[in-house]
Each structure stands twice: as structure tokens, then as C-alpha cells.
Amino acid sequence: MSLHIIIDGYNLIRQSATLSDLDRQDIQLGREALINMLAAYKKIKHHKITVVFDGTNAPFISLHRDKIKGIEINFSRIGESADTVIKRMALTEREKALIVSSDMEIVNAVTSQGASTISSPMFEEKIAMAKYMSVKDIDSENEGGWIPTTKKKGPSKRLSKKNEKTG
């Protein structure tokens, strides 16, 4: 089952110290920085990623849908919120979706539809960790150092119960 990460774009930008500074300078700078960050993450993790923005702040010549650096960009239509688009996508994707948002209305709605959620700050931490691990060339499947195995641990020659009591 492939994971589809659906991101509440402005929520993530405005929850991030770095991205929100750029957003305050120019909204387009914030969007571009987010897309660049996600494109780098996608190279490491290879998940399908869609960012949803409210269409009221869409670039004038923007289409409602676009793909930049492998990241799907979706602006809501006039009169429709990004929240509505995210909820609809979660309903379609269900358990294949990971919704990135700190908006509790979205989180509650998509969780009831079977999607998983992560807060915007936690997702940004995951991106930073993935980047760190790729630079350090650490296998991300074994983040905690634990390798799944059925091999038993402990001494190979164990005393019998009878010998344990006397020994």
C-alpha cells in the first residue's frame, strides 16, 4: 500500500518558523520554499505528496492543479476552502492517506474517514529527520536501531529447569 501525503499547505507554512518568515515577506516565497522542502523529502521517501492551498491566494495565472518537482499542487476553487478539498481527498484515499494539518476540524473529519494524521510541526520534524538520516546514510527503516527478526536472543546453551535449580 503506497502512502499519499496530503498537506494543508498554509497550515504547514504558518506553523513553521522558517517558512512563516518567508510567507510574511511574500506568500509566493513561502509556497516555493515549502515545495522545495517537500521535493527534497520526496527524493528520500518516494511517497506521493499533494499540497492543498486555498485558492483565494492562488497566483493569478495558476491552474487549480499543477505538478512541480514531483509534488502535486492543488488550489481550491473560488468559494471552496482547502479544508473541503483535503476532506474530500481523505474520503477517497482513506487509510492510504496521511493528512498533515494542525487544524482540529480537519483532523477530526479525516480521522473519522480512516485517514491518518500528523500535526504540521511533527511532519516538519519528520522531514528534518529524513534529511539528516539521508545525509548520514542511515537506513531509515531501522531508525531506532532495531532490526525486525525472529531470531531468539540469549545464551545458545541454556541450562534445563532441573539444572538451574541446583546450579
Image (cartoon, rainbow, N blue to C red):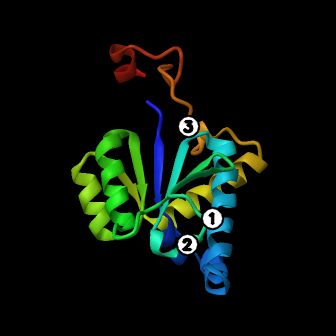
Residue wearing tag 1:
34
The x and y percentages for residue 136 are 77, 48
The kind of residue on which mark 3 rests is Trp
User: Hey, which quadrant is residue 110 in on the image?
Assistant: bottom left
Of all residues, the one furthest to the left in this rendering is 112
Secondary structure beneath dot 1 equals helix
Residue wearing tag 3:
146
The answer to which of marks 3 and 2 sits earlier in the sequence is: 2
The kind of residue on which mark 1 rests is Leu
Instruction: Please say if the residues under marks 3 and 2 sit with CB atoms less than 8 Å apart.
Output: no
Q: Nearest to the eye among marks 1 and 3: give it.
A: 1
Q: Is 42 left, or right, of 91 in this rendering?
A: right
Report crowding for label 1: few under 14, some 14 to 19, many 20 or more residues within 10 A (C-alpha): many
Q: How many marks?
A: 3
Instruction: Please say if the residues under marks 1 and 2 sit with CB atoms less than 8 Å apart.
Output: yes
The answer to which of marks 1 and 2 sits earlier in the sequence is: 2
Residue wearing tag 2:
13
In the rendered image, the quadrant that contains the C terminus is: top left
Report crowding for label 2: few under 14, some 14 to 19, many 20 or more residues within 10 A (C-alpha): many
From what the image shows, is residue 58 above or below residue 157? Answer: below
Residue 73 visible somewhere in the drawing: no
Q: Is 151 left, or right, of 17 in this rendering?
A: left
Residue 92 visible somewhere in the drawing: yes
